[in-house]
Image: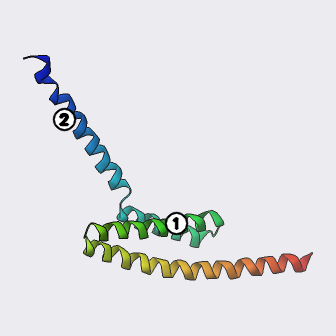
Amino acid sequence: MTTSSLRPFPSRFASLIACLCAVMLAGCDSPESTIREIRENLSAFQRQPNIITLDTLDKSFKKIDAQILDLEARERIDEADLYRRQAMLMREEYRQTRINFLKWSQRQSRSQSESQ
């Protein structure tokens, strides 16, 4: 065997490894993992409200919206609908939780200003 006949193997192997890495990275950033991330952050926010978790939730909702659009672009309509419905339900829960947090925050601000 000559060296030139062995060359395609490393090239193909490198391509295969690159594809596998891309699939694994894409799997880590799947709509399913984003939905799970939203659920976890929403639960954390409900237990202990804070601005950081609120910002994280906002980013996660933007992320799932982009992922849903990507699924639609790839004509995976059933999956897109499934994630859209899940995101809508969680978004409604998020909105209500956020409203309650803002009301609580305003009451805290008023009580602090009255005590001064």
The image quadrant of residue 35 is bottom left
Q: Quadrant of the N terminus?
A: top left
Q: Are marks 1 and 2 in contact (CB under 8 Å)?
A: no
Quick one: SS at disc 2? helix
N-terminal of the pair, mark 1 or mark 2, is 2
Q: Which label number is shown at residue 12?
A: 2
Residue beneath the point at 62% across and 82% down: 99
Q: Which residue is mark 1?
A: 41
Q: Which label number is shown at residue 4?
A: none
Q: Position of residue 98 (x, y in %)?
A: 60, 78
Amino acid beneath label 2? Arg
- Judge depth for marks 1 and 2 and give the one in front: 2
Amino acid beneath label 1? Asn
Disc 1 to disc 2, C-alpha distance? 41 Å
Q: Considering depth in this image, is 65 or 24 the residue closer to the camera?
A: 65
Specify the farthest residue to the top. Answer: 2
Q: Report the label total.
A: 2
Q: Position of residue 93 (x, y in %)?
A: 51, 80
Q: Quadrant of the C terminus?
A: bottom right
Residue beneath the point at 53% across and 77% down: 94
Q: Considering depth in this image, is 71 or 36 the residue closer to the camera?
A: 71
Quick one: SS at disc 1? helix
Tell me if mark 2 has few (under 14), some (14-19) or many (20+) residues whose alpha carbon lies within 10 angstroms of its own: few
Residue beneath the point at 46% across and 69% down: 39
